[in-house]
Image (cartoon, rainbow, N blue to C red):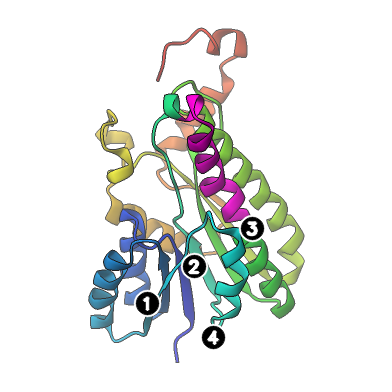
Amino acid sequence: MSEYALVLGASSDIAKYICLELAKKNWNLYLTGRNLKLLEELKTTLEESNIEVKIFYLDILDFTSHEKFYSNLKIKPSLVISAVGYYEDQNKARESFVESYKTVTVNYLGLMNLVNLISIDFEKKRNGKIVVISSVAGLRGRQLNYIYGSAKAGIRIYLQGLRNKLHSKNVKITTILLGPVYTKMSLGHKLMPVITLKPEIAGKKIVDASLKNKDEIYLHWIWKYIMFGIKLIPEFIFKRLPPF
């Protein structure tokens, strides 16, 4: 019997292609999210690959549900991929605590709580892989997305420490540094094709990085050099730059 992979936030555009890639490799799948209709549609598609697919309602904002959800999985996953993410509007997040709280909780606090639970189980078993999609937005604060970016920076540092802690326990932690992708989340944003991935390409690259036990990887190679340049700009110059 194939192993199980748990995909968090499986109703997202990128997660759909992550699941399709995993199905090609004969992984059984646990799919979580809040949109059960989309999850049911995805399940129907995936079952054509003759794998077992189970769906679960899971709200990353509901901390109290996390432990019960994971403990109820009769067969625990050996691979966890998080496609959980939320980004609406920087100005709205700045003006509204409700919006800023949601941005930080979805992208960092809620996800951290769930990963803590899973990583403790993996540590006991001395086996498992956890893959989290973060963002290049967490590598330097920019006026267009600094609240979202601060959450992504937080989860990146958390994963670095977790990777350090669990390295000797045979638990692999992979951080995906994602640039822009053509998804619902990016609608309304001015995206340059040369630095933007299609979701099906992103999904394949994420699965490849997961199975190769990468530590931290820029999903699109060009962002490694873009962010290298951005991080070199001195703060006294950077703070004067227009939005980008």
Instruction: Report the Cα–Cα distance between label 2 and label 3.
Output: 24 Å
Q: CA distance from mark 3 to mark 4?
A: 21 Å
Residue 189 is left or right of residue 56, and the answer is: left
Q: From the top left corner, tell me how far across and down residue 144 is, in percent.
A: 44, 24
In percent of width and height, residue 163 lies at: 68, 57
Dot in front, 2 or 4: 4
Is residue 39 rendered to the left or right of residue 111?
Answer: left
Q: Earlier in the sequence, mark 1 or mark 3?
A: 1
Three-letter amino acid code of the residue under disc 2:
Leu
SS class, disc 2 = helix
Residue drawn at the location 40% of the way across and 31% of the way down: 89
- The earlier-in-sequence mark between 4 and 1 is 1
Nearest to the eye among marks 1 and 3: give it: 3
- C-alpha gap between disc 1 and disc 3: 29 Å
Label 2 – label 4 distance at C-alpha: 20 Å
Q: Earlier in the sequence, mark 2 or mark 3?
A: 3
Q: Which residue is mark 2?
A: 211
Residue depicted at 27% across the width and 81% down the height = 47
Is most of the magenta stretch helix, strand or loop? helix
- Discs 1, 2 touching: Cβ within 8 Å: yes
Which residue bears the numbered disc 1?
25
* Residue at the disc numbered 4: 75
Q: For label 1, count other residues whose C-alpha is less than 10 Å away and answer few (under 14), some (14-19) or many (20+).
A: few
Residue drawn at point x = 29 percent, y = 52 percent: 199
x then y, percent, for residue 14: 34, 55
